[in-house]
Image (spheres, rainbow, N blue to C red):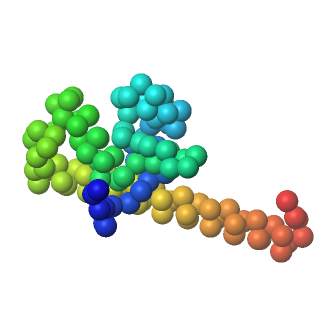
Amino acid sequence: MTTRKKDRLLHLPEISEITTLGEPTLRFQRHNGTGPPMFKMGRRLVCWESDLYAWMKEKAAEDGVLSAPANEVSDEDSSALRILELERENAQLRAERDALLRDRARAAKILNGGVS
């Protein structure tokens, strides 16, 4: 059994956000055996983060996007993966900011007497 001390378990919405594929598409790919290596944990589909990035790297290598084979990671590929990770973090921060702005607008409406 492999231990994954620094690996995160991602839920389907996170997998969808990282891959930019819709959840129905990911479910269909799983059914066909062409999608990321997801598995069921209870009623939820999940995937190890390292497995997801390895799958994405394999897909990119198949299309000739990466310079190294899928089992080798060059500095350029590591940078590309880091950029993907930062974009994901940025998207999460934007979502949190938007939620805070919505909450702030709701609070202002309530304080001004217009409950919605």
Rendering coords of residue 64 (x, y %)? 16, 31
| 68 sits left or right of 23 in the view | left
| Residue 51 appears in the figure | yes
| 80 sits left or right of 96 in the view | left
Q: Nearer the viewer, residue 65 or 51?
A: 51
Rendering coords of residue 84 (x, y %)? 31, 51
Rendering coords of residue 80 (x, y %)? 22, 50
Q: Nearer the viewer, residue 60 or 28?
A: 28
Residue lying at the far bottom of the rendered structure: 111
Q: Which of 36 and 111 is in front in this view?
A: 36
The quarter of the image holding the N terminus is bottom left
Residue visible at 88% across and 65% down?
A: 114
Q: Quadrant of residue 70?
A: top left
Residue visible at 44% across and 53% down?
A: 10
| 109 sits left or right of 31 in the view | right
| Residue 25 in the image: above or below residue 1 | above
Residue visible at 29% across and 41% down?
A: 56
Residue visible at 55% across and 49% down?
A: 42
Rendering coords of residue 3 (x, y %)? 29, 62
Residue lying at the far front of the rendered structure: 1
- Give the total of numbered labels: 0
| 93 sits left or right of 6 in the view | right
The quarter of the image holding the C terminus is bottom right
| Residue 17 appears in the figure | no
Q: Which of 5 and 82 is in front in this view?
A: 5
